[in-house]
Image: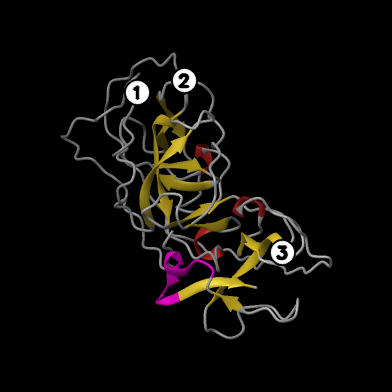
Amino acid sequence: MNVPSSCRFVAALLAGVGIAALGACSANAPEVPDDLVSPDPQPSKKPTGGSRGTSEVKEADASVPDAEVECKTVAPNNRCGLVPQCGCNNNETCDVTNETTGATSCVTAGGAALGRPCVQTGDCLAGLTCEYGACRPYCATPRTKCNVGGTDLCVETLGDDGKPITNKNFCTLKCDPRMPAAVCGTNSCHWLEDYYKPESVSDCNRPGTKLPYSDVCAGDADCQPGFACIKHPDYGFECERWCRIGVAGDCPTTPAGLKCNDVFGTLAPVINGVKEGLCQ
């Protein structure tokens, strides 16, 4: 692949905006010793690509089971319940803490709200888990729609072997890849146009560090917030800025001649009725 002969740098815009908090539930459940629990695992890897995002994020509703309904715990150790959250204290999250067995345990919660950056589940509000650097709820059935405001598709977490991790299903987050800070904070908003096909979804993910229009990238995870890794017909793989098609001023003046192109066609994100592309 070819690399531009001259550096064409564009700084990514970052801003932080608070997002409505998501509360968690608790219910009484018998304490079951868990000798399967391992330390909080690091988020597993996933390829990057695209989803139909939205700049509007509704307040997330916690899954609160009726006090008279028995807590539905999950195997193999049945320590607590993931969907809805139950079996832990009010300031705790039922989390999958053993990626080999899918065993759960109660993790003390933090203060990061839905979509906000995190390193581990303990950084997030009660009821939310940390996946791909963002706080989000668990969900029950992969490839179905989540019912929590601000989320979209329930997807599986893949292990290093490429197979789904038992019990570790989470909701993708609705965000605008052009303006990720509104939902994702300092993280990026990736557009997964065909990774979860036939669905196209957006999702918050950790930011990259590659310089736009200069460094070679291997995927969206390499790019700074507000940029996507795409193969340019002349320059090869590079991080290019998201923009609104037909809206003046979205593309920078340097390098010269950039304009917003329809890169994704029918799989492009449409935010508030406006189709998005990349500055090329």
Depth order, front residue of 72/110: 72
Residue, far bottom: 248
Apparent side of residue 263 relative to residue 73 in the rendered image (left or right): right
Q: Which residues are magenta?
A: 263-274
Q: Which residue is found at the position 63% from the left and 53% from the top?
A: 207
Which is closer to the viewer, label 3 or label 1?
Answer: 3
Choose top left, top right, bottom left or bottom right for residue 79: top left
**Residue 170 at x, y percent in the picture:** 40, 43
> Decide: marks 3, 1 in contact (CB < 8 A)?
no
> Decide: marks 2, 3 in contact (CB < 8 A)?
no
For disc 2, the marked residue is: 37
Q: Quick one: SS at disc 2? A: loop
For disc 1, the marked residue is: 79
Within-10-Å neighbours for mark 2: few <14, some 14–19, many 20+: some
> Does residue 110 lie above or below 202 as drawn?
above
In the rendering, which numbered label is found on residue 212? 3
Number of labels in the image equals: 3
* Identity, as a three-letter code, of the amino acid under mark 3: Pro
> Does residue 88 lie above or below 12 as drawn?
above
Within-10-Å neighbours for mark 3: few <14, some 14–19, many 20+: many
Q: Earlier in the sequence, mark 2 or mark 3?
A: 2
Q: Which residue is found at the position 32% from the left and 22% from the top?
A: 75
* Identity, as a three-letter code, of the amino acid under mark 2: Val
Q: Quick one: SS at disc 1? A: loop
> Decide: marks 1, 2 in contact (CB < 8 A)?
yes
**Residue 166 at x, y percent in the picture:** 39, 28
- Residue 116 can be seen in this image: no
Q: Quick one: SS at disc 3? A: loop
The residues bearing labels 2 and 3 have C-alpha atoms spaced at a distance of 42 Å
Depth order, front residue of 209/183: 209
Q: Earlier in the sequence, mark 1 or mark 2?
A: 2
